[in-house]
């Protein structure tokens, strides 16, 4: 088996590496807009990456993207080189990672023209209106309603755990438009400006000390019928497209590699009794085991990318990504805290803190991500039932009175 790259791809790798080295001083420290809006530096960085084809690579030029042909190897090389240099690969978040591919698959031409370009440029921040107090993991049980009035939908209800709703310009949300249709059949998918009258956002503070999650209340909120994605009652099908990309985003191989490289640097820098952590047999063994899993997830991401570019269903392979990625990221952060020993409990301004509390925040956030987007327990049921064809877990017998 020859695993070497063809000459054209080696040239492309040198091109990407030269770009990163030439522009890394202008790159922002982190990518994404989760919990806030993109800085001017990040917006400029995103613009440059789109122009060079390192972000929005396969999105058509008509919608503001680079317009490149799908190329699995080139995509992998871009991710590898940016991860190797520890340079962020542009803007991420619900809009870029989840909504844009959903619109490309199900949106109208007018919706694509209107929403995709400003989203990939970072000018529009989106949030996701899925979970409700009584419909989290059981999403089909949602109660928020949308009733047609003239050419509008009139929305009433509540969403919860809505990341970035306090800063978002837009929300993509699920509503029940056919109350008499059982569960999955009566759901529709809408795009909603967050400055619409009747919307109230209440932040929820988490164990990290931040308030990036929110409750959102809708009282007679009007949204044009033109903001309906697909047809009425098709929302469940469209929502599953979004969820598939959400799970794939959680398994970003570049993010894992960057985090692992930071972990290696930490184990080299921290010492105990004059011995660096990386030379401690226990820590080194845990580090190598994590490295093997990072490489495994990287290979798996290549498999997923191949299926995506070929428009093939990955089957059970696509169902394991979110679960395994969240567990892996959390365990890398856990090793970092153990390596720091008693200093691992310090952040938020302590003079002994490491990396401005990065590892403590990552440890708690990835623990939370084993719940967000579908709990680990629900993910295991999905893998078992939909992926492996195992029988459904029996429901408890109805109580007798």
Image: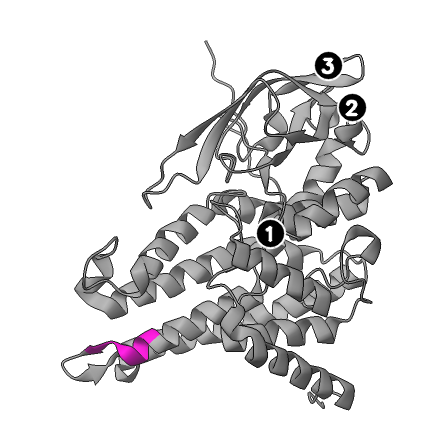
Q: For the view shown, which residue lies furthest in the top direction?
A: 401
Dot 3 or dot 1: first in sequence order is 3
Residue 365 sits above or below residue 130 on the image: below
Q: Decide which of tag 2 and tag 3 comes sooner along the chain.
A: 3
Above or below, 383 against 224 in this view is below
- Front disc: 1 or 2: 2
The part of the chain drawn in magenta is 266-271
Label 1: state its secondary structure.
helix
Which label lies toward us, 2 or 3?
2
Residue 53 visible at all: no
Q: Which mark is residue 225?
A: 2
Q: Is residue 270 magenta?
A: yes
Mark nearer the viewer, 3 or 1: 1
* Residue count near mark 1 (Cα–Cα under 10 Å), binned few <14, some 14–19, many ≥20: many
Residue 238 picture quarter: top right
50 horizontally vs 167: left or right = right
Q: Main secondary structure of the magenta part?
A: helix
Q: Label 1 near label 3: C-beta < 8 Å?
A: no
Q: Give the residue at x 56% y 68%.
A: 254
Q: Give the residue number, with chain letter if any, for mark 1.
A: 247
Q: Label for residue 180?
A: 3
Q: Secondary structure at mark 3?
A: loop
């Amino acid at each position: 088996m020859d695993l070497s790259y063809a000459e054209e791809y080696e040239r492309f790798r040198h091109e990407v590496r030269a770009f990163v080295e030439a522009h890394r001083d202008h790159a922002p420290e982190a990518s994404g807009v989760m919990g806030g809006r993109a800085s001017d530096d990040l917006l400029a960085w995103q613009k440059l990456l789109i122009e060079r084809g390192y972000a929005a690579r396969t999105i058509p030029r008509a919608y503001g993207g680079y317009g490149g042909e799908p190329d699995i190897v080139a995509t992998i090389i871009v991710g590898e080189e940016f991860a190797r240099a520890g340079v962020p690969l542009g803007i991420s978040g619900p809009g870029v990672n989840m909504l844009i591919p959903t619109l490309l698959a199900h949106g109208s031409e007018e919706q694509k023209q209107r929403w995709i370009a400003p989203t990939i440029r970072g000018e529009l921040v989106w949030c996701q209106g899925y979970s409700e107090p009584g419909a989290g993991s059981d999403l089909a049980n949602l109660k928020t309603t949308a009733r047609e009035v003239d050419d509008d939908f009139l929305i009433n209800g509540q969403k919860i755990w809505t990341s970035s709703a306090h800063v978002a310009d837009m929300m993509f949300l699920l509503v029940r438009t056919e109350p008499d249709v059982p569960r999955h059949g009566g759901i529709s998918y809408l795009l909603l400006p967050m400055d619409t009258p009747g919307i109230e956002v209440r932040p929820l503070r988490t164990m990290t000390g931040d308030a990036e999650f929110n409750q959102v209340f809708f009282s007679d909120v009007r949204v044009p019928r033109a903001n309906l994605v697909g047809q009425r009652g098709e929302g469940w099908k469209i929502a599953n497209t979004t969820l598939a990309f959400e799970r794939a985003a959680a398994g970003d191989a570049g993010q894992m590699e960057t985090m692992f490289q930071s972990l290696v640097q930490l184990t080299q820098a921290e010492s105990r009794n004059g011995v660096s952590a990386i030379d401690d047999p226990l820590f080194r063994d845990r580090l190598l085991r994590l490295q093997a899993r990072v490489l495994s997830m990287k290979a798996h991401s290549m498999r997923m990318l191949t299926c995506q570019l070929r428009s093939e269903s990955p089957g059970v392979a696509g169902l394991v990504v979110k679960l395994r990625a969240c567990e892996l990221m959390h365990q890398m952060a856990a090793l970092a805290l153990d390596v720091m020993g008693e200093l691992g409990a310090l952040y938020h301004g302590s003079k002994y803190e490491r990396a401005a509390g990065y590892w403590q925040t990552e440890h708690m956030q990835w623990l939370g991500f084993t719940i967000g987007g579908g709990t680990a327990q629900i993910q295991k049921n999905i893998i078992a039932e939909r992926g492996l064809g195992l029988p459904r877990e029996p429901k408890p017998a109805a109580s007798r009175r």
